[in-house]
Amino acid sequence: MYTYYISVGSNIGNKSDYINSAFQSLQQHGAICKLVTSSLIETEPWGYTEQDTFVNGVWSCESTLEPHQMLSLIQQLEQAAGRKRLIHWGPRTLDLDIILVYDTEGKMISLCDESLVIPHPHFWNRNFVLEPLSQLLPTFTYKGVKVADRLSQLEV
């Protein structure tokens, strides 16, 4: 069993509906249990900034799926929401990224190959990920820094 932390975002159309629909679909999947969501927040775009604001959050769940299987599942949810990958970091109906994964012993998994990098390579620099993540993992520490302290650093 793995514990996943998945960032979620949308900035096209009815943003909350895309997110809620994907949440319900994931909740109904047989290999997913204990699916929990942070609150959703409105944020400015990151990277490519010439686009509408985002609604962002983080989900946590337990699953028997291996990381690449989970990636395939969340990409299917993105496709079901009509996700188009036209501009890097561009507008999207639904964006789901695996941020962190823990194994059954509570150890953080590191993985890096051509299709998946865990922990997510940019998560530690994104308020829109760390703020909702801190709701689900308030004592989270990465590279010796507490998530609350990192959020303070990013706000400066």
Image (spheres, rainbow, N blue to C red):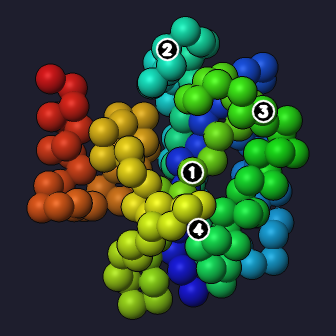
- Return the residue found at the far bottom: 105
Q: In this view, does 42 lie above or below 67?
A: above
Q: Which residue is drawn at 60% across and 12% down?
A: 52
**Residue on which disc 1 sits:** 97
Place residue 26 in its image quadrant: bottom right
* Residue 35 makes an appearance in the image: no
Left or right: 127 in relation to 33: left
User: Secondary structure under badge 2?
Assistant: loop
Q: Which residue is drawn at 58% across and 29% down?
A: 88
Marks 2 and 4, how far apart in space? Answer: 30 Å
Q: Which residue is drawn at 23% across and 38% down?
A: 151
**Residue on which disc 2 sits:** 49
User: How many circles with numbers are drawn on the protein?
Assistant: 4
Q: How crowded is mark 1: few (under 14 residues within 10 Å), some or many (20 or more)?
A: some
Of circles 3 and 1, the one toward us is 3
**Residue on which disc 4 sits:** 61
Q: Where is residue 101 in the image (x, y as percent from the top left)?
A: 46, 70
Marks 4 and 1, how far apart in space? Answer: 13 Å
Q: Which amino acid type is shown beneath numbered disc 1?
A: Asp
Left or right: 97 in relation to 86: left
* Residue 83 makes an appearance in the image: yes
Q: Which amino acid type is shown beneath numbered disc 3?
A: Lys
Quarter holding the N terminus?
Answer: bottom right
Q: Residue 81 versus residue 34: which sits nearer the camera?
A: 81
Of circles 4 and 3, the one toward us is 3
**Residue on which disc 3 sits:** 84
User: Secondary structure under badge 4?
Assistant: strand
Mark 3 or mark 2, which has the lower sequence index?
Answer: 2
